[in-house]
Amino acid sequence: MTDTAPQSTSSEPGAGPIPLAEQVVVVSGGARGLGAAVSRAFLDHGARVAIGYHRSRDAAEALAAEYPGRGFAVPLDVTDADRVGAGVEATAEQFGEPVSTVVNNALVDFVFDGDARPKAHELTRARLDAQLTGSVHGPLALIRAASPGMAGRGFGRVINIGTNLVQNPVVPYHDYTAAKAALLALTRTLAHDLGPDGITVNMVSGGLLRTTDASAATPEAVFDSIAASTPLGRVTTPAELADAVLFFASPWARAITGQNLIVDGGLVKG
């Protein structure tokens, strides 16, 4: 993928697509695991990136330091809408222009450990609310904070991180999967609402990734089983999923919105 934008036509609304190298990106949970892979992918393509963190300041600052002038560690607690807004404002001030692209990646207090998950009779409203706060209210806060600046320039890219468990709940992580299903619905409704402003809203849904902090508790036998069930014969990596995020942010996805792309090596269809 290059940073050369396809030529726009006069019939397109807004300012036309912006190359990756000219984008200002905010990645929530951008300092570790999948988020770090996404942040690094954008940075490697020349973008300016706010690496959002909550408890991982040292990791965020270390990653930002690898890309002087383009990496920016910013506190971003997605459970607090006011702090999310402050993070977006700080990013615009740091880079001298509004945020063009947001990646809603942050995962609030969740570990992929099937043995420890709450069963149906153990699932509480508090646990469900915690995932809804992180995976629905948090992304909405970030979109609300960034979308006025996007609309002002007639260009915006929103990429939400989902899960293939919505389509194939082989491990019933009830709270996590329900929240991601709600985020998928929000992805589609916001795509309709924000489209006239030149803003696209899409989702990239992975399976279990090899390996992130959240998946570190997963037994090796589970990874092997997934690999054996996948047409590509292996488990998807964070870097591979980050490639799909870049695609949705790139000019090559200029006519795509409201979509959910499953990136899991072909394990789940549709």
Image (cartoon, rainbow, N blue to C red):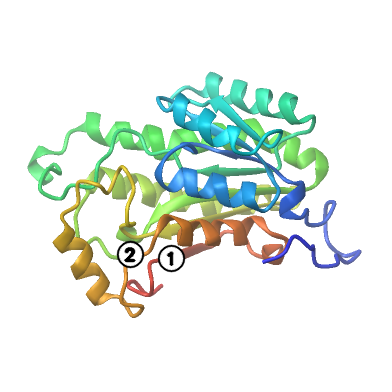
Which residue position holds label 1?
262
The quadrant where residue 55 appears: top left
**Residue drawn 47% across and 25% down?**
57
Q: Earlier in the sequence, mark 1 or mark 2?
A: 2
Let me know if residue 198 appears in the view: no
Q: CA distance from mark 1 to mark 2?
A: 9 Å
Quadrant of the rendering where the C terminus is positioned: bottom left
Whether pointer 1 and pointer 2 mark residues with C-beta atoms closer than 8 Å, the reply is yes
Q: Nearer the viewer, residue 83 or 10?
A: 83
Q: Is residue 253 visible?
A: yes
Quadrant where the N terminus is found in the figure:
bottom right
> Residue 83's image quarter?
top right
Is 118 in front, or is 212?
212
22 and 68: which one is in front? Answer: 68
Identify which amino acid the numbered label 2 is placed on: Gln
Q: Residue at x 42, y 58 (%)?
A: 205
Mark 1 secondary-structure assignment? strand
Tell me the residue that label 2 is attached to: 167
Question: Which mark is nearer the camera, 1 or 2?
Answer: 1
For residue 58, above or below residue 2: above
Number of the label disc, if any, that sits on residue 216: none
Q: Residue at x 68, y 38 (%)?
A: 147
In percent of width and height, residue 8 lies at 85, 65
Indicate left or right for 166 with 270 as reference. Answer: left
